[in-house]
Amino acid sequence: MSGLLRLYEDWIARLLILASFIVIGAGGLGAATTVGLIGLLLLPLIGFSALRASRSAVEPIIYGLAAVVWASISLVWSPYDRPDQIIKFFVLTPAYGLAVYAMARLDAGRAQDRLAWFSVCAGLLAVYLLFEVVSGAFLSAQFKLAFEPVKNPDEVAILADRILGRGTFAYLLVAGPVVLALWVFGGRLAKVVSALIAVAGVAASVSFGVSANALALMGGVVAATIAWRFPRATLQFGFSVAGAAIIAAPLIMGGLLSLIPPGFVDMLPLSWAMRIEIWQFAMERIAEAPITGHGLDASRVLGEPDVLRGVAFDRLPLHAHNAGLTIWLETGAVGAILFGGMLIAVGQTLSRRMLLPVQGAAIAYACTTFFVTVQVGSGVWQEWLHAALAFALIVPALIRRETGADIA
């Protein structure tokens, strides 16, 4: 590679890493663009190399391609007729994979440079989030007041929390791998930065009214702890469990819902009571088309208005708030088997790789945090979530056996 192309690659990566952290602080949605651009802008440099490297992951790629082809075909019988998600499947998802691969192929020196950018940016974002936690989302509220036609203080507070709650999830995804890399390979300053990043993650996860963030963080920490001791076995087992959870989603959820005692839902916070209503409604819709599903993105239009505790809500608000139920509802048993099979194949592929304990822990943390979130809160197709996961997975891809101290 010529010096000019090398310079291009270095600064594209650095600037888009910085941009990705900025948009995470602004709510995370912009990560769909910034992370995708890493892959797309570096495609001319890494395309042929990535194609050759894909031969080592043939099985998950075949399952994944079959799954998205089937999901795309299901749009034919879906009541939702816009092809947005198909475009995202075939453009954005590969771009996110290329972003990870672009970093994985770097030599040790350039990989350490990227880790330094991740570390400094994560530290700065941690300071911002801690300020928002302590101040009650002051900066986000002021932004809403300045740039949006919302003046009611209660509405402003809700919107500010929504931005920060969403951004916190993306932050949690990348913060865990960065903390691990800094703590293992860094010097004294790096360990201080890692502690700051971790404290900000914990504080933000219990703030801004998104309880799913705290659950996701706890799940990620548990997975990382186990994977540190048994990296390859943990990843194979974890992805197999995730795949089985998708394939058996109606059976699992049906069993769990049947165990809820009378009156228990009335004791739950309103958001969780609504989730249970959403899951029950999704189960009813799945039973109507269990083999082929209702079609891609059907969840967007199949909802029904309802009222719970005097609050109006939709019994299917864009998605089923559970990855497995959404996949079953829209793509049926066929899609669930293909997507679940893809996850199982990913676990088997990773189990054959020689991973450092810190790499295994970082991958387990990021993937578990993501999976917990899409199981209880966010939509499984949301592209900014996929981008945030890919951004987090860049960190273990940058770790080398030669990585030394003073990353940050």
Image (cartoon, rainbow, N blue to C red):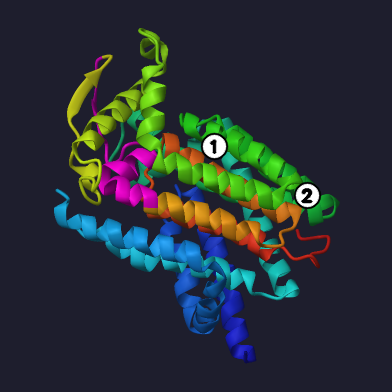
Write down the quadrant of residue 150 in the picture: top left
Relative to residue 126, is residue 88 drawn left or right? left
Q: At x 62% / y 52%, what residue is drawn?
A: 363
Disc nearer the start of the sequence (2/1) = 2
| Residue 9 position within the rendered picture, expressed as x and y whole percent measured from the top left | 58, 79
| Residue 306 position within the rendered picture, expressed as x and y whole percent measured from the top left | 20, 23
How far apart in space, not on screen, are marks 2 and 1 (Cα)? 21 Å
Q: At x 47% / y 46%, what residue is drawn?
A: 243
Q: Is residue 280 visible?
A: yes
Q: Start and end of the magenta stretch?
A: 310-337
Q: At x 60% / y 61%, what residue is drawn?
A: 394
Is residue 386 positioned above or below 127 on the image? Answer: below
Circle 1 residue = 216
Q: Quadrant of the N terminus?
A: bottom right
Is residue 286 positioned above or below 56 on the image? Answer: above
Q: Quadrant of the C terminus?
A: bottom right
Residue 318 belongs to the span the image colors magenta: yes
- Camera-nearest residue between 281 and 303: 281
Secondary structure state at the residue bearing disc 2: helix
Q: Are marks 2 and 1 in contact (CB under 8 Å)?
A: no
| Residue 353 position within the rendered picture, expressed as x and y whole percent measured from the top left | 67, 62
Secondary structure state at the residue bearing disc 1: helix
Residue 331 belongs to the span the image colors magenta: yes
Residue 183 tag number: 2
The residue under label 2 is which amino acid type? Trp
Relative to residue 355, is residue 220 drawn left or right? left
